[in-house]
Amino acid sequence: MNDQYATMSVMPRLRTIAVIVVPIALAIGMSLLADSGAAEQASATVLVNDVLTAPLKEAVVEMRLVEPGLLRDTALGGKQLTISIAKKDMGRQIALQSGTFEKVGTAMTGFDGRAFLRFTPRIDGNFAVRVEYHGNEGRRTVEAAALFASWERRRPIIFVEAAALMGKQPDSVPLLPGVKLPVAVEALTTPIGGAVQQLERLTRFYFYAVYVVRSPGIDPQEFRAWLTQHDFPPGLTRVIAPGPEALRALLEEFRERGFKNIKGGVGRRRDFAEVFASERRTTVILAETGKDDEFPRKTKWATDWLMVRKHLQG
């Protein structure tokens, strides 16, 4: 009898505990979900590529939303991105985030985190494009910027190797076999004296500029930030693999898109010179030590950027 009464007295207590525990568990679960959403918003990164087109020719702005990881990025699908484009040509204003922007549309990311938006520019020029991810209401906005290049196909283009802008182009940092971390903008060296001023004179009236990074370890957005930090004139940024094949493919890409007026290239490496010399384009190699007989015979040599400019305008 006593055991029966003992059991009956315990059951109400168990029900009372269960009534208390369930709401607490629900509250904890909701809190974890909220924290997870906040963490995703805080760590989300927007990636956007530079865009090349011509006036009145439709182009596609390609974006990606990811959560960076140590070994690989995690795609964030089903998220809405807002795309805005500057109303005016950047001119000498190389800070991509500045200026007056006009919203041109929104795009939803797919399962791979990618999103696309079609846009047709009316005039030629270098325009900043800004992509924003607002996330949940009240969260910090994540954004990225790139160049929307609406170029006249008749104007000549020069390709500038990143190594010709810096004293030494850094390599990516090995983490594990086959895994490399991107080089941060702080790790990039200071520009070679005169590079900014002479490139500004070249691009103001004569040429469009394409900045070629031949090291996959350097992140395009970090390199753009470096260019902005040091006041380089606006230009497309292209990151390609080392070696002549990737460089040839890049030149062919421009030709296929109708940009055939390639004036030449400015670089440091022999394979860079060989590609442009084989294309019969002006090939300028920046070398403080002077001429090297292993380079193509028609290579033009420069010990500073003033000589570079004179070779390209000559």
Image (cartoon, rainbow, N blue to C red):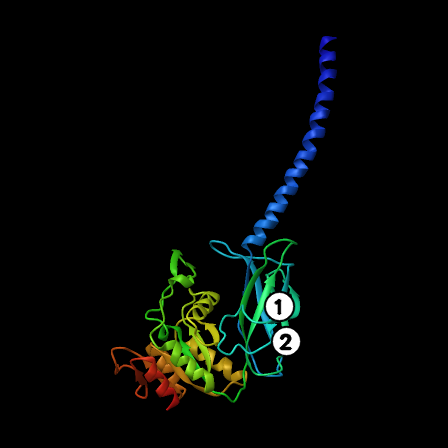
Displayed quadrant of residue 180:
bottom left
What amino acid is found at the position of numbered circle 2 in the picture?
Answer: Phe
Q: Is residue 182 left or right of residue 142?
A: left
Picture coordinates of residue 257, whole percent (x, y): 54, 83
Picture coordinates of residue 245, whole percent (x, y): 42, 76
Up the image or down, 40 lies above or below 168; here it is above
Q: Is residue 48 visible?
A: no
Up the image or down, 205 lies above or below 66; here it is below
Whichever of callouts 2 and 1 sits on the residue coming sooner in the sequence is 1
User: Residue at the spot x=37%, y=91% of the render?
Assistant: 314
Q: Give the residue pinned by disc 2.
A: 119
Displayed quadrant of residue 289:
bottom left
Q: Do residues under tags 2 and 1 come within 8 Å of each other at their CB atoms?
A: yes
Question: Can you tell which mark lies on residue 218?
Answer: none
Q: Give the residue pinned by disc 1.
A: 83
Question: Which quarter of the rendering shows the N terminus?
Answer: top right
In the current view of this chain or complex, which residue is farthest to the top?
1
> What element does badge 1 sit on?
strand
Displayed quadrant of residue 274:
bottom left
Picture coordinates of residue 206, whole percent (x, y): 45, 87
The foreground one among 30 and 214 is 30
